[in-house]
Image (cartoon, helix red, strand yellow):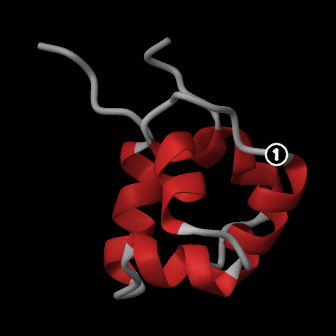
Amino acid sequence: MAKKKFLKLKSAMVEHDITQAEAAKRIGKGLTYLNERMTGKRAFSFNDAQLLGKILDIPKSDWADYFTDESA
C-alpha cells in the first residue's frame, strides 16, 4: 500500500477546517501552487512552511514532519 503524501499536513488542515483553496489564498498563492506541493510535484519552500505553520499552529521544530515527503 502506497503511503499518502503529506498526511500530517492534510490532517492539520482538516483539524483547522481549512481547505487547500483557503490555505492557498491565505498564503497568497493559487490552488495549483499549493496542490503541486501537496502532491509532491514541487517542494515546499521555507516561506511556505512559515506561513502554513502559523495558520495551522505547527511549531517550527515539527516542520520537517509536515513539509517534507517521507514517501519519496
Could you tell me which residue is drawn at 48 percent across and 56 percent down? 9
- Which amino acid type is marked by label 1? Ser
* Quarter assignment of residue 56: bottom right
68 versus 66 height, above or below: above
Which residue lies most toward the left here?
1
Residue that mark 1 sits on: 45
Left or right: 22, with 24 as reference point: left
Could you tell me which residue is drawn at 76 percent across and 57 percent down? 49
Numbered disc total = 1
Left or right: 49, with 20 as reference point: right
Give how far across and how far down residue 46 sits, in percent: 88, 50
Identify the element where label 1 is drawn.
Answer: loop
The quarter in which the N terminus is drawn is top left
Left or right: 54, with 72 as reference point: right
Which residue lies most toward the right here?
46
66 versus 71 height, above or below: below
Give how far across and how far down residue 51 sits, in percent: 78, 72
* Quarter assignment of residue 28: bottom right
Could you tell me which residue is drawn at 43 percent across and 51 percent down? 8
Label 1 neighbourhood size at 10 Å, few (<14), some (14-19), many (20+)? few
8 versus 2 height, above or below: below
Front one among 30 and 2: 30
Front one among 69 and 34: 34
Could you tell me which residue is drawn at 67 percent across and 68 percent down? 58
Front one among 31 and 53: 31
